[in-house]
Image: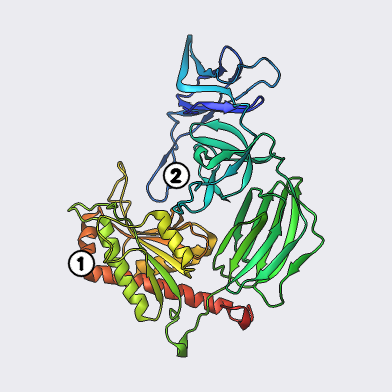
Amino acid sequence: VTPHDSLELDPGDVVEVRFRGVPGLRARAILGRQLAAADFTETSGDFTETADFMETAVSDSAPAWAWYRAELRLPRTRPLPAFGAPQPLAIEVARGGEVLLYTLPQVAVGLRDPAAGPIALLDDDPARRGDTDGSVVGRTAPDGVYFLFLPNGTRAATGRRTGDLVELRLDDDLSVWAARADVHPLPASTPKLESRVPAVRALDLGRWTRILIPLETRLPVQVRQRTDPARYEITVFGARAAAEFLRYDRVGGIVRELRWNQPANDRFVLEVELTHGQPWGFRYGYDGNDLYLDVRHPPRLRKGLFGSILRGVKIVVDPGHSPDPGAVGPTGLAEKDVNLAVGLELAHELRERGADVVLTRDAATPPDSGPGLNDRTNLAASEEADLLVSVHHNALPDGVNPFESHGTSTFHYHPQSLPLARAIQRELLRELGLRDLGVAIGNLALARPTAMPAVLVESAFMMIPEQEEMLRTEQFRRREARAIRRGLERFLEKSLDESLGEMPEESRD
């Protein structure tokens, strides 16, 4: 049953109530003493999920369960309970001649604090400890997935609240939910969030090209990376186009074209198309009230007479976990130890061929310590690494058949990392011969960095006895490292082949 937590709303807001039950029920959602009521609609169907990247299997037989959904709208004009007097939420269910009333425990609906301003400052590191990623996550729903990342310092209109989450109203048609601890209310006198976009400019910063969008305040923004052709789509919520000119810094840069669009009154979209096929990274944020998107230039790649294509490429190798052990095999082998052994072997393989390797932890790291997830990604960003590979070995949750769901998988998050994930996956399968669990988008901290292509590799399963036994051997770990190295080489070679002729030499790093 949802919702799980109490809600704070404004007049006219909607509460979605859902539950699962047997088919054929008649049900109503009731708020307080008939303050609001709505009938449930039934959606039949049942499904099961497996561990192989959440593959959905639909049953052909009659469903044993049905989903029920209702929308309760808080009145706008009728007398409402005062702030601090939340109302209970209940579900009335009728089947046959029997009627049951079920009050949701620990769930109540009340008005939002009128003293709280409608505008908030977003910041996930108000103490300035520097141990966060510097952005606030926006989820699709209170129980939803990551949708966008808002830079610290962004201002956003707030709405409903539930549990430890706050709704951020980006515009009339789109909302996301953020952690309450990252949302800091501003005074009620804070001006409305809106801005003109008077100009757009592309500036050459050496290793990066900066797209600069001056604004009057720090509005919510979403950056989407696209491929074929390679481009970025910047959406600024609350902004209106007023630019007569979009200026390129110089001819021959990595920006092929700038295009703007105004799909809604309060939504400005800028599209940045690149001259090369493989994106190499991006970062965005605010400098004062100026929104910027930095687009990374391709690294200088050479092969053939110049030696290995890895020469001069900076690669961060992350042996996953520690101090936590990660997965533990049947005989007690800890994943963190295997990850470190493979990571060190991979670093050796890469350095032998001229790569500049940075390890997030190494043999000198005490076994009961290790960097946090944000420390690892922040290290990769500060080093301006060209590539990031996080080494892991998998496990299975309870209730999953271990004889069917095991093998090799590689995860990425942004489109720029998909070719790298595929190249590494192919080489691991060729070398290790384990079952192919495929390449997948994974909402994982070490796959999410934007400043470089980044992947997380799950080469084998710790909890499969035969695979744990192989992971104990130096020979298998060396083969695994060689396969990852070859995957990196294949990716770089393909990127170089595709980029030749796409951009002038002076625009390369």
User: In the shown orientation, is residue 369 left or right of residue 318?
Assistant: left
Q: Position of residue 303 (x, y in %)?
A: 47, 84
Tell me where residue 109 sits by quadrant. top right
Residue at the (67%, 64%) spot, across then down: 211
Q: Secondary structure at mark 2?
A: strand
Q: Residue furthest right?
A: 244
Q: What x and y, as percent, mark residue 159?
A: 61, 34
N-terminal of the pair, mark 2 or mark 1, is: 2
Q: Residues within 10 Å of mark 2 (few under 14, many from 20)?
A: few
Q: Name the amino acid, label 1.
A: Thr
- Amino acid residing under circle 2: Thr
Circle 1 residue: 473
Position of residue 273 in the picture relative to residue 484 (left or right): right
Please report the residue visible at 69 percent of the width from the left and 49 percent of the height from the top: 217
Q: CA distance from mark 2 to mark 1?
A: 36 Å
Near-viewer residue (463 or 452): 452
**Which residue is nearer to you in this view: 412 or 372?**
372
Against 437, residue 502 (above or below) is: below
Residues 8 and 19: in front is 8
User: Which of the numbered marks, if any, corresponds to residue 56?
Assistant: 2
Q: Are marks 2 and 1 in contact (CB under 8 Å)?
A: no
Most foreground residue, 468 or 444: 444
User: Which disc number belongs to residue 118?
Assistant: none
Tell me which corner region of the image, top left, top right, bottom left or bottom right, holds residue 70: top right
Count up the numbered dots: 2
Location of the C terminus by quadrant is: bottom right
Q: Is residue 61 above or below residue 245?
A: above
What residue is shown at x 26% (from left), y 61% (from top)? Answer: 338
